[in-house]
Image: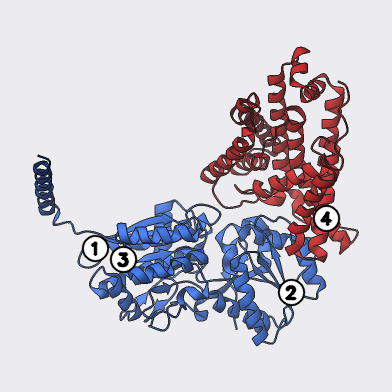
Amino acid sequence: MRRRTLLLAVAAVAAIAAATTAWTQPVKPPVKVALVAAMSGGSALSGEAIKRGLTVAIDEINARGGVLGGRKIELVVRDEEGNPSKGVAAARDVIEREGAVTVFGGLHSPVGLAMLPVFHELKVPYVGTWAAATGITRNGRRPNFMFRVSANDDIVDHFLARYVVERLGRKRPGVILENTPWGASNQEGLTKWFGKLGAQPVGFEKFNWNDSDMSAQLLRLKSGGADALVMIANAPEGAQVVRSKAKIGWDAPVVSHWGISGGRFAELTGELAESVVFVQTYSFFGKQSEVGERVIAALKAKYGLKGPEDILAPVGTANAYDAMHLVALAIEQAGAADGVRIQQALENLNVEYRGLIKTYRRPFTPDEHDALNENDYILVTWKQGKIVPVAMK
Amino acid sequence: MLAQLLFSGLALGSMYALVALGYHITYATSRTVNFSQGQSVMVGAVVAYVLHVTLGWPLAAAVVATLAALAGLGLLVERVAVRPFLRSSSIAWLLSTIALGIIAENVAMLAFGKDARAFPSPLTRRPWTVLGAGVYPHELLLPLAGLAIAGTVEVAFRRTLAGKALRAVAHSHDAAGLMGIDVGRTITAAYVLSSLLAGIAGVLLAPLLNVSATMGTTIGLKGFAVAIIGGIDSARGIVVAGWLYGVLESVVAGYLGTGVREIVGFAVVILVLLVRPAGVFGGRALGRV
């Protein structure tokens, strides 16, 4: 009796399945890609920015008819809450249950590093859009499933150190950084590159998240004879550094990593913002390329932004936009929604992509999994609330 | 350098003291504290920001409305997170007030957003130079505000009938009840007062701390440390302990480095707990009321 019911049920399901397949055949299944990033907590802004960049690119791709002969791209988003083990679970979930064929990563380097074995086990490419830890892409694996369209701390530190030593001609920089693994990774990079450039850092001072007064740390650097300040901070603490610096009447130039662009640094610091130069991969201010105009228009229409000053965490949006287009091209070239073939296609992309940040010609090779490098970084500063490039010799 | 560290420490310590005074008021009446006092400060700052900056109200109107809103919040905290647990004499209020704080923080993230915003103040635009040290005029305001509030609280507790009722309730709920004091209402009043203080602190700290959903966490914790050090029973003790703690943090950070700041700071808390459990300035027996 029981078996008969079961058989009947199976038959019914089969019949329904057959009927629905027949019905839905003209609609091809979507190709799923996933974003595993911090969507809540203190870094939520970065996750939202990345999601927006991906979404704008996906809308463009789908409007052109999708990939693989008419399949739409669909985005699955998971929140890793800045927690590596949640990231690992989310990566498995989006690949095994949702069937994502590429996973984009968010701001937190520890999460990217923790997920690395999952992508190699399940053979699905990861494309980082923010987290800059060197070891994410340079991991010694072959084939390597970890790609990145973002900065790399080591390269950024070289970039910052060169600016301080060669452009500003300062040999005794002071460094202030946050008391986190991100701060530590930059302490390592800056120590190395300042050393190679013949400069001697006066000191590395640290602060904790939500600290409100940095004058003690800055006084130590100032009285140690620092002639420039390198800052590794996010927007709220970065603003406190700059305000405390003005308070103690120290006028050394400030050169900053891009963390301060993840919030409203210019609003928090007012005219003091103009004393800081910082690194970016892209600026939505000033004269835009055709692609830039298009992306800004799409962001305005979709998210009700008034202008580029409302594009918070702009690097996330810009990196994610280009990353999504590169992945779509790779899926097309792979000819299948399959992780291994997409990995190979990414390493050997044979079409040129005119993107937002630059024109990509073979962005990745088996040996180089960072699409952006020192030549693609720009130094910018604020002028009357707008981000403007700083001339680089 | 020392002058600079002293000024910075004094401003910082005054912030802690302003928060700590909120713990004092409820502890003095009900022997409970609102562990989300830091988050209440955040709510004060956020409400003031939305009214003054987003909606463009004049500062005075925004402050009055903020204080009214915070009085309501105090009522809510007492009704929801404290009163149900007072009778059973359990310490469940400890967890329930923390829970309320976490809820407040997440509601603020949803409603206000996650990024820090600047609260404009004409007193934080240019630093002044005092004794060779830079100081924002707004920072000088904080120690004065702390003194004024502590003074008002002490006088009100000692001299007014309502204050005496508050202290009587602190002494013994039963005895106060027998004397015709409405114990429940008195405790409610203490929570409203404490929440009002959080509102004042929120408005005062906003220009220095920036306004964000997470701004209350650190000052809430440090404020509690200061309340313990100063003696949670003594308003003036709390203000002085706040200053000392802020200066200690600043001087340690300046001469020994930031890494040891929290170690030294919280070691002092433990030391005080060991040597003077009632706090440096606390422990005087309650007089007759």
Q: Between marks 3 and 2, how big is the CA–CA gap?
A: 45 Å
Q: Is residue B264 above or below residue B84?
A: below
User: Which chain hosts label 2?
Assistant: A
Residue bearing the label numbered 3: A101
- The kind of residue tagged 4 is Leu
Q: Can residue A383 be seen at all in this image of the molecule?
A: yes
Q: Which of marks 1 and 2 is in front?
A: 2
Q: Is residue B49 above or below residue A51?
A: above
> Residue B81, how many percent across, how many down?
60, 31
Q: Which mark is residue B141?
A: none
* Secondary structure beneath label 4: helix
Residue bearing the label numbered 1: A65
Residue bearing the label numbered 4: B248
User: Which chain hosts label 3?
Assistant: A
Mark closest to the chain's N terminus, 1 or 3: 1
- The kind of residue tagged 3 is Val
The quarter of the picture where residue B4 lies is bottom right
Identify the colour of chain A in the image: blue
Q: Nearer the viewer, mark 1 or mark 3?
A: 3
Q: Between marks 1 and 2, how big is the CA–CA gap?
A: 55 Å
* Secondary structure beneath label 1: loop
From the viewer's side, name the closer residue of B193 and B176: B176
* Secondary structure beneath label 2: strand
View extreme (right): residue: B131
Q: Which of marks 2 and 4 is in front?
A: 4
Q: Can residue A160 be seen at all in this image of the molecule?
A: no
Q: Between marks 3 and 4, how big is the CA–CA gap?
A: 55 Å
| Same chain letter for marks 1 and 4 | no
Horizontal side, residue B249 vs residue A209: left or right: right
Residue bearing the label numbered 2: A203
